[in-house]
């Protein structure tokens, strides 16, 4: 490409990015520091407190956690994945065939050698703990070996980097950022636009509907709290989270408190190791929870576990949950 | 009437500790059990008291076989004072002595006022009454010895077995203890005490049982038994037996 | 007699305190229920009087709070008595109910079923695990020769270490993000799931096993100076030891199966009572039971209300409260230590 053409392409990308960024609004100031896109490569980021410098689009990626794998599949970058690990559940049908051909390195967080054996140049991780000495490796050590690492910003643990309150803008900003890294900004923008459209059409619940986001646990339930993905989804669906005033992503909450709040709807996280059905059976068998309005009426909404962590499945899942609400007669 | 031991044997892990021990000593006297270290004195005392696992033999006393009795009944007749009794818990003197009443108490009738009286008497007799409410840990070795003796006395035993009761005691306390034992014997209690100090034995005891390597070497009146030849054979030292100028009791002087 | 009267006074005071504690703590909780409403609801269930509460509110009182408070009382009593007996049998004031591998074995059983997702079997698995560890400990101690307190403790240590390592292995190998939380909660000890079945197990064990060993445990005084001394006092040493040990182990096993391995109760409370009322087991055992019950009822109430809506596993608070008390006890007894 001649010098001037490259210049033009860079300007075009800059223009496009500026429009999209402007559309994101205020929330972006809360997220990780994203440099304006006119610089192309190297891409320099502050990702959960670690400086990451990417000189060219990665070609051999190891993904850890479903959110990472699915993000790349959604951006059409499945062929760049040399191995995936710590899957939280099956991928949606549209990517099932492609996913089958990706090698599984481990059911849980993989060890350092297993990851390095695939000669990756990039590791895309869902949780910060996936990148430690006894899992895939310390981030600076990997960087020295020429392996860049990236953690989903929604999952940053340090207060400075953890979103004060997760919104879809955070999720989309992450998609954008990864799109930049892989030179797939067009695909990223298209994906974001499509998901925004989906969200715009989400069926919301009737005004004043309260909900419990029941993740796991029996004696002492683990529920979605005020600043993470569960809160984000519930708000999008127009429901009030009974644990909204707890300043955490998820929290434990006693049945007594839940009974006292008597939520109208219970959102059940469906995981392969702890299914929605198991949760329903438990709720129906326990003498106190069996009396909750939501249980008596059968007002259950299900969300698959991989979609319950912030990622590319969250928006479609939200829309799908809206449909469930509508079927239950709870939509506006 | 006497205290008789017959065919007493004990082996531990195949090693013979006590072998074919037999003795016959009169009741109501102070009998010394003497012998070098490792002779088996402690094990023999435990055998006689019925508290030693794996022993064999019989002990006849006041017309009954002690080792064939039920343990609770036996505990009302026989009391054992061990060397170096030690407790991890902060018991008071009075509480310790009260333990001696356990053979007389049952789950349903735990404590009688009679127990109090007997405990008080035991404390008086042993001179432990002055520190009755202190904890054991605050007492000297000698004072603790007195407490253990008081505990045994609270059992109102007919047969009192003591393992080295004069260890850790200064001369005055030693003499005091043995005088007390003499007095008890005069009041009808049979005493068998393991002693390492031959002169103490000679001063206070009427009879003696001499053991070496788990066997009885000699039994009988002390005057007759504790002779220089025997002492040489058992202890491997040279001894002269003399008479105390005032009491007439034997006094033993040692040399290489 | 001074000592006896003191013990009786303590006993009376603690019994009253226990009754009051149960009555009061059942009205405390995150749901805003009025005190009178709570009592009226209970009375209604007992067949006298009536209640205005909704079904859910009633459920909170009768299905959540009341069984939990009662279970806490039973568990506290059981662990305290068991601890006192272990301390007497091993002649060591630092012994606790879990000495013979009981908690490690129970933890292993519990973690296994938690990971396999068979939560319903949890109490059974914990109990079986505890008993298996106990048998292993006694067999190991036996194989070393005549069973002595030291050998028993050492054997218990070996079995505990092994069970602990196996538990860690199982956790590390198979635990998903969710089960880590449940496992941790169980390992620290928690009364969150206490229902009427738990009351039946813990309360039933107190009645069927706890009461007999409290009464029979009076003979433990004889063990103060060792086995020979106890035998000389007419005690059947090995039968007594086995019966009391077995009883304490069953008691502990039942409690652990219901609440996980709650620490410090069995260690600290008997020592505290020893300081207050002396070492005679006639008083020590029943008073330890009472104080254990009162302690646990209040600590569990704190665990479930202090950090609402979060709940702390009660085992965290027993250690937070128990450790300073323990340090204080050590300091006060420094001359004896």
Image (cartoon, coloured by chain):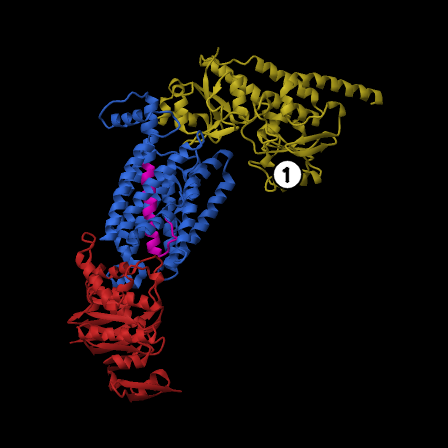
Chain colours: A yellow, B red, C blue
Where residue B205 appears, x then y in whole percent?
25, 79
Counting every numbered tag in the picture gives 1
**Is residue A298 depicted above or below C129 in this figure?**
above
Residue C54 shown left or right of residue A36 in the figure: left
* Element type where label 1 sits in the image: helix
For label 1, the crowd category at 10 Å Cα-Cα, with few meaning under 14, some 14 to 19 and many 20 or more, is many
Magenta span main SS? helix
Chain to which mark 1 belongs: A
Where residue C86 appears, x then y in whole percent?
34, 52
Magenta-colored span: C70-97
In magenta stretch: residue C241: no
Residue A279 shown left or right of residue A67 in the figure: left
Where residue C251 appears, x then y in whole percent?
32, 45
Q: Closest to the observer: C86 or B214?
A: C86
* Residue B6 appears in the figure: no
In magenta stretch: residue C73: yes
Where residue B227 appears, x then y in whole percent?
29, 87
Q: Closest to the observer: A250 or B119?
A: B119
Q: Closest to the observer: C138 or A107?
A: C138
* Furthest-top residue in this view: A332
Figure quadrant of residue A77? top right
Q: Quadrant of the N terminus of chain A?
A: top right
**Is residue C20 depicted above or below C9 in this figure?**
above
* Residue A210 appears in the figure: yes
Figure quadrant of residue B251? bottom left
Residue plotted at (19% across, 64% down): B76
* Furthest-front residue in this view: B130
**Is residue C36 depicted above or below C12 in this figure?**
above
Figure quadrant of residue C293? top left
- Location of mark 1 (residue): A115
């Amino acid at each position: 490409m001649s010098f001037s053409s490259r210049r033009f392409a860079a300007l075009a990308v800059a223009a496009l990015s500026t429009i999209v960024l402007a559309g994101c609004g205020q929330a972006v100031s809360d997220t990780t520091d994203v440099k304006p896109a006119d610089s192309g490569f190297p891409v320099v980021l502050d990702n959960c407190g670690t400086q990451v410098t990417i000189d060219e689009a990665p070609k051999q990626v190891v993904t850890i956690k479903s959110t990472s794998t699915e993000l790349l599949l959604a951006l059409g970058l499945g062929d760049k994945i040399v191995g995936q690990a710590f899957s939280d559940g099956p991928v949606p049908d549209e990517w099932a065939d492609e996913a089958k051909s990706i090698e599984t390195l481990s059911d849980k967080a993989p060890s350092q050698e297993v990851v390095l054996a695939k000669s990756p140049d990039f590791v895309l991780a869902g949780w910060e703990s996936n990148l430690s000495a006894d899992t895939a490796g310390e981030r600076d050590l990997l960087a020295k070996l020429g392996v860049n690492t990236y953690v989903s910003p929604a999952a940053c643990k340090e207060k400075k980097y953890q979103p004060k309150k997760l919104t879809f803008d955070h999720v989309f900003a992450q998609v954008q950022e990864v799109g930049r890294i892989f030179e797939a900004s067009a695909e990223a923008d298209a994906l974001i636009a499509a998901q925004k459209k989906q969200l715009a059409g989400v069926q919301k619940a009737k005004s004043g509907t309260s909900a419990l986001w029941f993740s796991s646990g029996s004696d002492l339930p683990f529920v979605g709290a005020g600043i993470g993905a569960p809160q984000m989804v519930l708000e999008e669906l127009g429901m009030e989270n009974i644990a909204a005033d707890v300043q955490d992503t998820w929290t434990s909450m006693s049945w007594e408190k839940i009974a006292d709040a008597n939520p109208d709807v219970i959102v059940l996280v469906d995981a392969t190791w702890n299914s929605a059905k198991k949760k329903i059976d438990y709720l129906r068998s326990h003498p106190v929870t069996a009396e909750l309005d939501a249980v008596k009426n059968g007002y259950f909404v299900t969300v698959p576990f991989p979609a319950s962590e912030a990622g590319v499945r969250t928006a479609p899942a939200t829309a799908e949950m809206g449909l469930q609400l509508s079927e239950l007669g709870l939509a506006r | 009437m006497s205290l008789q031991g017959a065919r007493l044997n004990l082996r531990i892990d195949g090693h013979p500790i006590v072998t074919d021990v037999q003795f016959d000593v009169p009741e109501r006297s102070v009998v010394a059990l003497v012998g070098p270290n490792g002779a088996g004195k402690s094990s023999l005392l435990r055998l006689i008291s019925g508290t030693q696992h794996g022993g064999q033999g019989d002990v006849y006393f006041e017309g009954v076989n002690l080792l064939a009795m039920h343990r609770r009944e036996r505990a009302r007749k026989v009391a054992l004072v061990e060397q170096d009794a030690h407790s991890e818990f902060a018991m008071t003197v009075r509480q310790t002595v009260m333990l001696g009443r356990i053979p007389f108490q049952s789950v349903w009738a735990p404590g009688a006022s009679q127990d109090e009286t007997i405990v008080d008497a035991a404390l008086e007799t042993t001179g432990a009454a002055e520190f009755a409410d202190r904890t054991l840990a605050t007492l000297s070795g000698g004072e603790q010895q007195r407490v253990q003796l008081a505990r045994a006395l609270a059992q109102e035993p007919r047969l009192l077995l003591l393992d080295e009761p004069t260890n850790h005691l200064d001369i005055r306390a030693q003499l005091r203890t043995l005088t007390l034992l003499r007095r008890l014997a005069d009041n009808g209690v049979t005493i068998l005490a393991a002693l390492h100090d031959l002169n103490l034995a000679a001063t206070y005891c009427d009879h003696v049982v001499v053991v070496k390597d788990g066997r009885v070497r000699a039994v009988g009146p002390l005057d007759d038994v504790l002779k220089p030849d025997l002492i040489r054979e058992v202890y491997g030292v040279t001894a002269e037996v003399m008479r105390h100028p005032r009491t007439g009791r034997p006094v033993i002087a040692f040399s290489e | 007699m001074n000592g006896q009267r003191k013990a009786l006074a303590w006993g009376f005071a603690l019994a009253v305190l226990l009754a009051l504690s149960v009555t009061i703590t059942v009205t405390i909780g995150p749901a805003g229920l009025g005190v009178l409403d709570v009592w009226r609801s209970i009375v209604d269930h007992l067949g006298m009087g009536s209640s205005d509460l909704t079904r859910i509110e009633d459920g909170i009182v009768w299905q959540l709070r009341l069984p939990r408070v009662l279970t806490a009382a039973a568990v506290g009593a059981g662990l305290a008595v068991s601890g006192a007996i272990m301390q007497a049998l091993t002649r060591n004031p630092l012994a606790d109910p879990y000495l013979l591998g009981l908690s490690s074995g129970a933890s292993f059983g519990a973690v296994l079923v938690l990971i396999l997702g068979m939560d319903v079997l949890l109490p059974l698995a914990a109990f079986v695990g505890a008993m298996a560890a106990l048998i292993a400990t006694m067999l190991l101690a036996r194989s070393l020769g005549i069973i002595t307190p030291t050998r028993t403790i050492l054997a218990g240590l070996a079995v505990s270490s092994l069970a602990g390592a196996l538990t860690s292995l199982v956790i590390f190998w198979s635990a998903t993000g969710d089960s880590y939380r449940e496992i941790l909660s169980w390992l620290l000890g928690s009364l969150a799931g206490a229902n009427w079945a738990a009351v039946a197990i813990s309360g039933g064990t107190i009645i069927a096993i706890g009461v007999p060993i409290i009464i029979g445990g009076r003979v433990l005084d004889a063990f103060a100076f060792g086995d020979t001394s106890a035998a000389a006092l007419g005690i059947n040493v090995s039968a007594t030891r086995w019966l009391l040990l077995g009883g304490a182990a069953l008691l502990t096993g039942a409690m652990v199966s219901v609440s996980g391995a709650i620490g410090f109760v069995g260690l600290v409370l008997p020592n505290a009572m020893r300081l207050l009322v002396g070492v005679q087991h006639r008083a020590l055992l029943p008073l330890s039971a009472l104080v254990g019950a009162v302690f646990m009822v209040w600590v569990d109430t704190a665990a479930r209300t202090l950090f609402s809506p979060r709940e702390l596993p009660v085992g965290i608070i027993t250690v937070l409260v128990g450790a300073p008390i323990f340090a204080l006890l050590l300091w006060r007894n420094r001359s004896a230590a």
